[in-house]
Amino acid sequence: MTPFDIGAIAIGVLILLILIGMPIGISMLSVSLAGVALIRNETVAVRMMTQVANDSLEEYLFAVVPLFVLMGLLVTVSGVGKDTFDVFQKLLRRVTAGLGVATVFANAVFAAITGISIASATVFSRIAVPEMRRHGYTNRFATGVVAGSSVLGMLIPPSLLMIVYAVLAEQSVGRMFLAGIGPGLLLALAFIVTIFFLASTRRTFVFERGDGAAYADIGLLDIVAKSVPILSLMILVLGGLYRGYLNPTEAGAAGAFGALVIAVLRRSLDRATFWRILVETGQITVSVLFLILAATFFSRMLALSGVPRELAEFFLSGNVGPYGFLVAYILLIVALGCLIDSISIMLIVLPIALPVADAAQFDLVWFGVITVIAVEIGLLTPPFGLSVYTIKSAMDDPGLKVGEIFGGAFPFVLAMLATLAVIVIAPSTATWLARF
């Protein structure tokens, strides 16, 4: 067999192992080790694996992963998400479908300090859905808004997916974060337009009955008090990054410390909770870094086999062309999103796709934004739909059907596809801030 044949077979075996339930990190390491052994020999394979383990995890940059994860978990337990929703509920109470719009705004702001979509889905399914139900919104719409807007957590910085992409693509984490701001705001705007459109053309989709429930009344001082913590964290993290005062790792450390201070001042962090958060941070960090290690080894095995080079030649020298490759890439990611989780998709596809994108002379920062949005669509599509199942689990409502949540999220999937098309047609929407 030629090296190309071995690489192609390795990709097929990897997909098969994942489908039968083997953990993706172990699958990638096993396939990569076997692939290098067949292309070269067992000694080279073992040495390459140990070298990858050393090279891929020793960088100072990787400290950013536990720091941003810790910050997100601390913010989640401190009650900042509820305060953010209360503020926007007050400001938008007279707007048509105002609670839906408030949920999108609150999720966008909450995303700017958590970076994890599942955290947003968990928090707002418990805060926003009961409030919307109380005011006469349908279960389908209320859960759909939360599911749709939760994906902003992986686009608006800081974002765990952006960090993973930056590592795999060897791009600046800071530039990736800045590149996510414009598309994140554009996507939030698309969600708001979708809500207004549904409220004016399909009222039975949005409203079950008239809005007769009383809103919780909070004064100006309460609004200021509830806004200060989250705005302070945003200014600390994003302001430090944007102005160049902090690199991504330092911004993560500052954000984690700020979130800890907020949690302590609010007395929402006892000893047991703090220990649980530290353990969860460690578990998430180890999982992500192990997957990055496996993906790096897989990428080197593929480079050794010549598969990315052959694919680049196929797509770029024939009738398909660069944008034909891009369309096929997006469709593949959306399809995979129906089956496996976001990080797994990126780890499988990017080692193959990045060399082709580089050969096509695509801006890899722009390509990363497209990748993250396409991957996030998978959080809302059946049968996997991780955000949907997270909401179902968090709601603990036997009468709430998973199909109902998927139905409510479908308009927001269309909004994401429209936003993705805009970013493909107008790349500057994703790159203008990253240039600074």
Image (tube, helix red, strand yellow):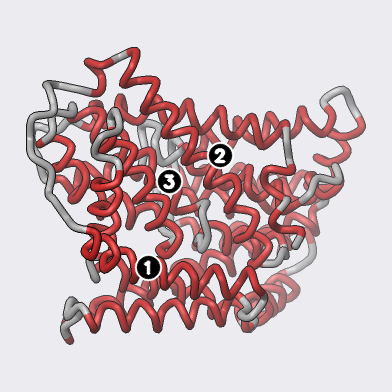
Q: CA distance from mark 2 to mark 1?
A: 23 Å
Circle 2 or circle 1, nearest the eye: 1
Q: Position of residue 144 (x, y in %)?
A: 30, 33
Q: Nearer the viewer, residue 414 or 97?
A: 97
Q: Residue at x 40, y 63 (%)?
A: 114
The single residue placed furthest to the bottom in the displayed view is 271
Q: Position of residue 111 (x, y in %)?
A: 42, 56
Vertical arrangement, residue 94 with respect to residue 170, above or below: above
Figure label count? 3
Amino acid residing under circle 2: Ala
SS label for mark 2: helix
Vertical arrangement, residue 407 with respect to residue 291, above or below: above
Q: Quadrant of residue 143?
A: top left
- Which residue in the structure is indicated by mark 1? 72
Give whichever of discs 2 and 1 has the lower sequence position: 1
Q: Position of residue 57 (x, y in %)?
A: 60, 78
- Which residue in the structure is indicated by mark 3? 151
Q: Nearer the viewer, residue 291 or 387?
A: 387
Q: CA distance from mark 3 to mark 2?
A: 11 Å
- Which residue in the structure is indicated by mark 2? 374
Left or right of 268 in this view: 423: right
Amino acid residing under circle 3: Val
Give whichever of discs 3 and 2 has the lower sequence position: 3
Q: Dividing the image into 4 quarters, which one contains the C terminus? A: bottom right
SS label for mark 3: helix
SS label for mark 1: helix
Circle 3 or circle 2, nearest the eye: 3
Q: Position of residue 318 (x, y in %)?
A: 89, 27
